[in-house]
Amino acid sequence: MPLQPNVWTKYSDNGSTCVEVLLTESEVLVRNSLRPDAGTVSFTHAEWHSHTQGQKLGVFDLPADLT
């Protein structure tokens, strides 16, 4: 599902911890939806693309004993 510009998109794998992502014209912002005032992490579009490609390849998967 592609991100929609200027809309926070929430994702939760287990229902309790949530990540929100916001696509802007120049960057992608990420925050913890349970603590949105705690700040955001920003990525350029190129950085975000590289990261999502790595996710699809399993580069960032945790070892089975940690999940």
Image (cartoon, grey):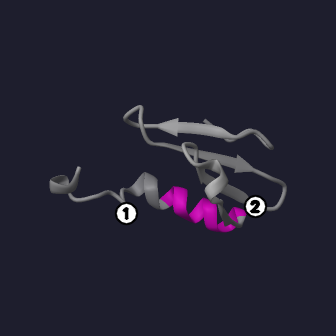
Which of the marked residues, 1 or 2, is nearer the chain's N terminus? 2
Q: Is residue 12 above or below residue 19?
A: above
Q: Quadrant of residue 42?
A: bottom right
Residue at 52%, 38% in the rendered image: 11
Q: Is residue 65 above or below residue 34?
A: below
- Quarter holding the N terminus is top right
Callout 2 secondary element: loop
Asked if residue 47 lies in the magenta stretch, the reply is yes
> Residue 12, image x and y in percent?
46, 37
Q: CA distance from mark 1 to mark 2?
A: 22 Å
Region in magenta: 45-53
Q: Which residue is mark 1?
A: 59
| Residue 44: mark | none
The residue at the point 36 percent across, 56 percent down is 58
Amino acid identity at mark 1: Val
Q: Exactly how many numbered labels are in the figure?
A: 2
Left or right, 14 with respect to 4, comes to left
Residue 52 within the segment the image draws in magenta = yes
